[in-house]
Image (cartoon, rainbow, N blue to C red):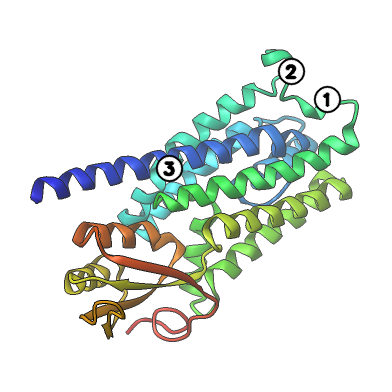
Amino acid sequence: MKLKLNKFDIWTHIKNFFLVVFGTGVLAFGTAVFLVPYELVTGGVSGISIVLDAFSNDVFGFTFGEDFYITALTWIFFFLGWIFLGKDFALKTIVSTIFYPIMYGWCALLVDPELNILNGYFIIHNSPYHDVAVVIAATLGGVCVGIGCAIAYKGGGSTGGVDVLALLLSKAFKRVKTSHIIFGIDAIIVICGIFVIGDMVVSLLGIVSAFLCAMMIDKVFLGNDGAYMAHIVSDEYEIISKGIIKQLDRTATVVDATGAYSGESKRMLIVSFSMREYADLMHIINHADPKAFVTISRAFENHGEGWTKDKT
């Protein structure tokens, strides 16, 4: 039994690793091929990089390029998270921190006119149908970024970036939801882009792209930093509840239940958790009881300790 659990643990970590890497790759592709070539500011690290690159070019007359800013900001945010948010957060972001700049650099080669990879198939910003192409870029860019982030979250990882700033600010403003802080940061980045880029149409398309990104995260993962509820029926409910308390720093409610078909008495756990805790929760459940029956649903509102009130 111990050997099986070890094999299961190894498989779970491998699967989550590839989910995070694949999600990071989709995110990098959408950013490099669709967003950056059109200077579509949608928030996040790519939005900051576009704004900084345009600002340095207009004011100082030189630029390091968006890829430089993306790499530098990705690592800066990683070390800020490591210092102020702890080792656990750093471990969740390390995979994306390493692979995102590399994958972005690879994907950026696809739109390099000098290399002309695949006869310039991905260079849509030079298309004669420019007005249509920019709309397509905003749409596909938002979709790719949203799907990439959601896949990385499913693997138990985090793309880091402005999430680090949001989590740091949420410690200072504990009554404000993290999702609202992220929205506020992205809004500031987009507003800066309006003034720096100087193209209202492109700026508005950036907002549309950001909306599509959030919508895709909602469709793929059922929400951005939202609340969820799991109903878990298992004979190993005590082990699962202890794992939830110790590893997730949350609690659960134990409910007496009776099987309608078998008539057997069972114990059911009810636990509320956030999107970023999904992979850890499923690992706890599967590790304790692979045959456990689990139902997960969206909780539109959660109030009380650990959500709208500080933990005691």
Label whose residue precedes the other's in the sequence (3 or 2): 3
Quadrant housing residue 305: bottom left
Q: Which mark is residue 230?
A: none
Q: How far apart are marks 1 and 2 (CA)?
A: 9 Å
Residue 17 placement, left or right of 175: left
Are the two marked residues, 1 and 2, in contact with CB atoms closer than 8 angstroms?
A: yes
Where's residue 108, x and y in %? 63, 27
Residue at which label 3 appears: 19
Q: Distance between the residues labelled 3 and 1?
A: 33 Å
User: Which quarter of the rendering shows the C terminus?
Assistant: bottom left
Where's residue 208, x and y in %? 77, 54
Res. 255 in view: no
Residue 15 placement, left or right of 58: left
**Which of the pair 127/288 is nearer the observer?**
288
Disc 3 crowd rating (10 Å Cα; few below 14, some 14-19, many 20+) is: many
Q: Which mark is residue 120?
A: 2
Relative to residue 85, is residue 148 depicted above or below?
above
Q: Distance between the residues labelled 3 and 2?
A: 29 Å
Q: Is mark 2 on a helix, strand or loop?
A: helix
Disc 1 crowd rating (10 Å Cα; few below 14, some 14-19, many 20+) is: few
**Which of the pair 73/308 is nearer the observer?**
308
Q: Residue 126 carries which label?
A: 1
Residue 177 placement, left or right of 143: left
Are the two marked residues, 3 and 2, in contact with CB atoms closer than 8 angstroms?
A: no
